[in-house]
């Protein structure tokens, strides 16, 4: 059975250098590193060993901020060699606009024009670096784009600055022939008290105000939507329906907690099941990117266990979705719950004046309709039995 859940290149499982490269320090950075840092090249080899398809990076995951040109060239040469050795690809890149002290009050939305200009410079250089390794998706996570108090910033000004930055960088990508698709990543809070555009839905609305909305989509993350107490699969479905699901971050998270970034499938079995089922059924063809971290208790063998576990869980949920769809009793209940009634076809769908008039005159038996049991309890328990391996 175990061999049925081995990752293959066609699964497009990717990890960030920052995920498997995490030193294990806690979110408050008060403890010593648990794991010694590995070079980007060694992290690529680790991912090759566990069967990943690709590796993604922030600019400074690969090249330290203060590296000299000679140091940067050496790192890039070693990284390229490791990619060639393992066959891993780089589908996505992004910019770290949140760690350095200069971004303490935002990057693109900072009140200080020098900070905004520096953020644009850093993002352009990051885009150059990503393109050098073949990345076609560029993610923007505005971790510092917000405030702790509304006395500090005008949110309209903040959104204006964010819009101007993305318009500028979109034109830069086009001028360089990079062909990037931008993917905006939402998060409700942490490290800021409140982050602008806190949910995937908010990002989708904002995208339509940009100069080139066709090149901009979203990168929804399970943990971030769960932090807001929302249903992640619903956010993904909305993004897919809008044609904007350019990338996705998979991990796990207790609701309404700090950003835990757990192994995919660790906590939210049903939510993860429905997410995987959705992605596979609609034919999502992008990377399945795991933006998560191994427990802080682990050495690098534990990091490998973590990475293998993320991919294995996805494939288990994929198999469970197949079994769910092929279970005749379950599917009979699903079909029954949809309450197909062809007599209503004449009322539904596209509007016409005749249809509206006929519908207004129709008499419904509300009590009979309301009295029909939907059998969702039975259906949900059947799913539970399937998930727990007793069906």
Image (tube, rainbow, N blue to C red):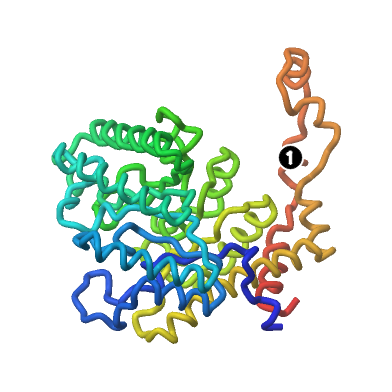
Q: Secondary structure at mark 1?
A: helix
Q: In the displayed structure, would residue 120 be above or below residue 69?
A: above
What quarter of the picture does the C terminus occupy? bottom right
Q: Position of residue 341 (x, y in %)?
A: 83, 38
Query: In this orientation, does residue 253 appear?
Result: no
Q: Position of residue 86 (x, y in %)?
A: 52, 73
> Are there few (<14), some (14-19), or many (20+) residues within 10 Å of tag 1?
few
- Is residue 288 shown left or right of residue 300? right
Q: Position of residue 382 (x, y in %)?
A: 72, 68
User: What residue is rendered at 26% in x and 31% in y?
Assistant: 156
Examine the image and state in which quarter residue 363 appears: top right
Query: In this orientation, does residue 197 appear?
Result: yes
Q: Position of residue 158 (x, y in %)?
A: 25, 36
User: What residue is rendered at 32% in x and 53% in y?
Assistant: 95
User: What residue is rendered at 31% in x and 82% in y?
Assistant: 35
Pick the residue in front: 390 or 197: 197
Of all residues, the one furthest to the top in this rendering is 353
Q: In the displayed structure, would residue 8 be above or below residue 113?
A: below
What quarter of the picture does the N terminus occupy? bottom right
| Residue under label 1 | 367
Q: In the displayed structure, would residue 164 be above or below residue 287?
A: above
- Is residue 333 shown left or right of residue 299? right
Examine the image and state in which quarter residue 170 appears: top left
Pick the residue in front: 74 or 116: 74
Tag count: 1
């Amino acid at each position: 059975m175990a061999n049925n859940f081995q990752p293959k290149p066609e699964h497009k499982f990717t990890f960030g250098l920052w995920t498997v490269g995490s030193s294990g320090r806690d979110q408050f950075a008060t403890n010593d590193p648990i794991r010694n840092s590995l070079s980007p090249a060694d992290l690529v080899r680790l991912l090759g060993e566990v069967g990943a398809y690709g590796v993604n990076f922030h600019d400074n995951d690969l090249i330290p901020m203060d590296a000299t040109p000679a140091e940067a060239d050496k790192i890039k040469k070693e990284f390229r060699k490791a990619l060639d050795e393992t066959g891993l690809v780089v589908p996505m890149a992004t910019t770290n606009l949140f760690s350095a002290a200069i971004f303490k009050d935002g990057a693109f939305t900072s009140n200080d024009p020098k900070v905004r200009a520096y953020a644009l410079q850093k993002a352009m250089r990051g885009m150059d670096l990503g393109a050098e390794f073949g990345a076609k998706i560029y993610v923007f996570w505005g971790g510092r784009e917000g405030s702790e108090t509304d006395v500090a910033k005008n949110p309209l000004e903040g959104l204006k600055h964010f819009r101007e930055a993305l318009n500028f960088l979109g034109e830069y990508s086009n001028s360089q022939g990079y062909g990037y698709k931008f993917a905006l990543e939402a998060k409700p809070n942490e490290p800021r008290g409140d982050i602008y555009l806190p949910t995937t839905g908010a990002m989708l609305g904002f995208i339509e105000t940009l100069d080139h909305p066709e090149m901009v989509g979203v990168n929804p993350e399970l943990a971030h939507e769960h932090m807001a107490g929302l249903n992640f699969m619903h956010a993904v479905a909305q993004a897919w329906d809008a044609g904007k699901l350019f990338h996705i971050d998979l991990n796990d998270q207790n609701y309404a907690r700090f950003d835990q970034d757990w192994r995919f499938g660790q906590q939210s079995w049903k939510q993860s099941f429905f997410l995987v089922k959705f992605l596979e059924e609609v034919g999502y063809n992008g990377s399945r990117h795991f933006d998560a971290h191994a427990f802080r208790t682990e050495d690098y063998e534990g990091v490998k266990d973590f990475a293998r576990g993320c991919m294995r869980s996805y494939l288990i949920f994929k198999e469970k979705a197949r079994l769910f769809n092929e279970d005749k009793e379950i599917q009979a209940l699903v079909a029954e719950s949809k309450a197909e009634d062809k007599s209503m076809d004449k009322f539904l769908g596209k509007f016409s004046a005749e249809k509206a008039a006929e519908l207004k005159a129709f008499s419904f038996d509300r009590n009979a309709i309301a009295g029909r049991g939907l059998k969702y309890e039975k259906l949900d328990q059947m799913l539970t039995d399937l998930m727990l391996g007793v069906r």
